[in-house]
Image: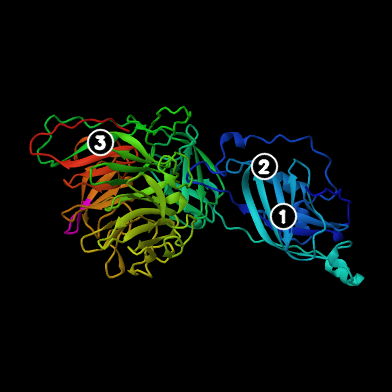
């Protein structure tokens, strides 16, 4: 620790002031509560000793303004003073009190660290904050020159804010920088002026709209919200289960997000940019869902209903077997694990289903006989290759079966693609597993939150690189290229290299080699000739009819059947839609209100349908994310059908 020097009061002209801009930062992870998402215990008052008398050097904002300093309300004023060869910085008591203050969206800080770096010199001074007292930072014998000054404000192990900039250090008496300098030069160099450090532009939440309403978007306000890539929700009753919201629109000070379903009680909301940084945790009393009555069963439903919905897997009541050795108590006994948040689905030639659970960082397998088991992943977020029961994933999303035998996994939180072979060995298939954007070989390419996957007729693997707002292609030769998107958010159509994407999540390839893209509420197509076109209505909503007039709310999974129909999971409309080759969009199943109801498609209900898989017999398996579970839509023989109430949500 640097030694502490007691400050000797100096006349005002001898003081210099530094304005340090701190802005929010804090690591967010899609796999667990991030340091910025503070549990209630962290929001308790800080225990502090009895305040000491105020320092004579304490400075108020008003005094700073009277002295001609421009002091915005979101800055910190530091007083700089030389003591021999040391440089001492002081945070006035008024500033200390301001940073200690807690609000519903700001937990208050415990301490601030200042660091000076110049060449090989690096020193960090730490000062706990105590009410009514200035905080003092001492740097021992810093060299003269242009240095980097950085600061962080923290609470416990959580970094709440940071700032960085440059500082011109003078030659001081007793320091090496003052050797052989004329006295008048030394005096001139010792003058310190006010500096303003540039802010780090990370997202910062201030407040939100009124009490959240079920099934309605949530309006958040703050700063730098155009940078937000992830909105995380967690219920206090189950803080280990982290859910993601769907970003609808964003600007500098406004963010509209559709919350996930199944929230209740006290709920925390936090945001993060593409690098996982963000500040501000909002806490809500979330309204409980009011069960709506199931439709009255119709003993003899019309035979005209040619499709029926049935539940294949209820994740709430059908636990999965975890392989021996992964049991939480390490007793070697088999544990039972329930599905939490299914995000991707794939099916193999034998009829087994593979499910990605992004909340548990696992891949599950449902056998044709109906047995559910953990196929890969320990349940802890991480990145580890090797045997499936020891491998680690981080928020896996899209899945795709490899016709050669094996499973591709879009490991979104690790920003790379993984592969599970038939021997259940996990390897990294493409990407450095560091968030970024770079084309090239499999081991050099970079992705940012890859999501949907699709296979082209030539064997190319297409990747919806969600946070990079691009579509990537991995050739059979192992080269990663960009086939659409500039990286800038938008909906501009045109040549693929000039087109803009907002949030591509799901992909499907048709017989002609065109790539269909689920981009928020827009259905778009990348033609084989390299042109991006928006085919559905430009506004979100719900409307059937010609594709150009049809509206979707949030597009989930896409899948083509053998007849050329495109099946669409319209997640936030809680419906399964179908686009026929002639260009007509119709609703095949689902109702206005979410729920769990089997039977004829005219009465069946879903809750946030996501991924889709079309089976060889023409039936469609749907990931019902709100359940969570699997539902199957299949044709039935003519004749009366009795609906089966499966319950309601």
Q: Residue at x 79, y 49 (%)?
A: 2
Q: Pick whichever, 73 or 43, lies toward us.
A: 43
Q: Secondary structure at mark 3?
A: strand
Tell me where residue 549 sits by quadrant.
bottom left
Which of the two residues, 537 or 452, is positioned nearer the viewer here? 452
Q: CA distance from mark 3 to mark 1?
A: 58 Å
Say if residue 328 shows up in the picture. Answer: yes
Q: Position of residue 147 (x, y in %)?
A: 73, 63
Answer with left or right where residue 117 lies relative to residue 562: right
Left or right of 524 on screen, residue 219? right
> Is residue 262 positioned above or below 154 on the image?
above
Q: Is residue 410 above or below residue 189?
A: above
Residue 331 lies in the magenta-colored region: no
Q: Crowding near pointer 2: few (<14 within 10 Å), some, many (20+)?
A: few
Which secondary structure lies at badge 1? strand
Residue highlighted by disc 2: 101
Q: For mark 1, does the 10 Å Cα neighbourhood hold few (<14), some (14 to 19), or many (20 or more) residues?
A: some
Which range of residues does the magenta coloring cover?
A: 578-585
Q: Residue placed at 84% from the left, 66% from the top?
A: 177
Label 1: which residue? 115
**Residue 459 point in image, percent of width and height:** 28, 61
- Queried whether the magenta region covers residue 583, the answer comes back as yes
Q: Where's the C terminus, which quadrant?
A: top left
Q: Earlier in the sequence, mark 3 or mark 2?
A: 2
From the viewer's perspective, is the residue at label 2 or at label 1 nearer?
1
């Amino acid at each position: 620790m640097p030694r502490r020097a007691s400050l000797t009061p100096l006349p005002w002209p001898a003081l210099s002031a530094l304005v340090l801009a701190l802005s929010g930062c804090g690591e967010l992870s899609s796999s667990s509560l991030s340091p910025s998402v503070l549990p209630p215990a962290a929001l308790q008052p800080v225990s502090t000793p009895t305040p000491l008398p105020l320092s004579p050097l304490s400075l108020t904002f008003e005094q700073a303004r009277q002295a001609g300093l421009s002091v915005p309300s979101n800055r910190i004023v530091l007083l700089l003073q030389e003591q021999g060869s040391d440089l001492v910085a002081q945070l006035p008591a008024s500033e200390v009190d301001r940073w200690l203050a807690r609000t519903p969206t700001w937990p208050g800080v415990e301490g601030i660290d200042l660091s000076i770096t110049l060449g090989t010199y690096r020193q960090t001074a730490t000062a706990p904050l105590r009410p009514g007292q200035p905080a003092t930072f001492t740097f021992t014998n810093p060299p003269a020159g242009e240095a980097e000054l950085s600061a962080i404000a923290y609470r416990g192990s959580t970094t709440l804010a940071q700032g960085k900039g440059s500082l011109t250090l003078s030659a001081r008496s007793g320091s090496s920088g003052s050797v052989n300098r004329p006295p008048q030069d030394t005096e001139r160099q010792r003058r310190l002026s006010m500096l303003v450090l540039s802010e780090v532009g990370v997202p910062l939440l201030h407040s939100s709209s009124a009490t959240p309403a079920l099934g309605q978007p949530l309006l958040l306000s703050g700063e730098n919200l155009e940078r937000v890539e992830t909105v995380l929700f967690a219920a206090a009753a189950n803080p280990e289960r982290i859910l993601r919201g769907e970003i609808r629109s964003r600007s500098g000070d406004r963010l509209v997000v559709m919350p996930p379903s199944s929230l209740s009680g006290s709920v925390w909301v936090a945001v993060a940019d593409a690098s996982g940084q963000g500040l501000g945790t909002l806490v809500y009393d979330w309204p409980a869902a009011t069960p709506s009555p199931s439709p009255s069963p119709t003993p003899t439903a019309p035979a005209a209903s040619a499709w029926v919905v049935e539940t294949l897997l209820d994740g709430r009541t059908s636990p999965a077997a975890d392989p021996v050795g992964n049991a939480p108590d390490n007793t070697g006994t088999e544990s039972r694990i329930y599905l939490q948040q299914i995000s991707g689905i794939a099916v193999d030639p034998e009829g087994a289903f593979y499910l990605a659970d992004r909340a548990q960082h696992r891949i599950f397998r449902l056998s044709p006989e109906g047995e559910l088991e953990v196929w890969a992943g320990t349940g802890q977020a991480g990145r580890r290759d090797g045997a499936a029961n020891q491998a680690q994933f981080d928020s896996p999303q899209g899945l795709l079966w490899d016709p050669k035998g094996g499973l591709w996994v879009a490991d979104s939180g690790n920003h790379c693609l993984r592969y599970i072979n038939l021997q259940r060995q996990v390897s990294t298939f493409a990407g450095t597993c560091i968030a970024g954007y770079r084309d090239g070989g499999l081991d050099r390419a970079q992705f940012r939150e890859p999501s949907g996957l699709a296979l082209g007729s030539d064997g190319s693997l297409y990747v919806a690189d969600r946070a990079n707002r691009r579509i990537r292609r991995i050739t059979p030769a192992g080269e990663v290229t960009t086939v659409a998107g500039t990286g800038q958010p938008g909906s501009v159509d045109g040549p693929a290299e000039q087109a803009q994407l907002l949030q591509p999540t799901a992909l499907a390839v048709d017989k002609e080699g065109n790539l269909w893209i689920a981009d928020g509420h827009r259905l778009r197509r990348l033609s084989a000739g390299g042109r991006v076109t928006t085919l559905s209505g430009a506004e979100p909503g719900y409307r059937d009819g010609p594709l150009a007039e049809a509206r979707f709310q949030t597009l989930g999974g896409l899948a083509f059947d053998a007849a050329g129909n495109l099946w669409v999971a319209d997640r936030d409309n809680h419906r399964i839609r179908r686009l026929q080759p002639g260009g007509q969009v119709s609703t095949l199943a689902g109702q206005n209100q979410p729920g769990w109801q089997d039977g004829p498609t005219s009465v069946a209900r879903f809750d946030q349908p996501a991924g889709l898989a079309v089976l060889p017999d023409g039936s469609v398996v749907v990931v019902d994310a709100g359940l969570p579970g699997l539902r199957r839509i299949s044709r039935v023989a003519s004749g009366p059908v009795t609906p089966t109430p499966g319950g309601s949500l």
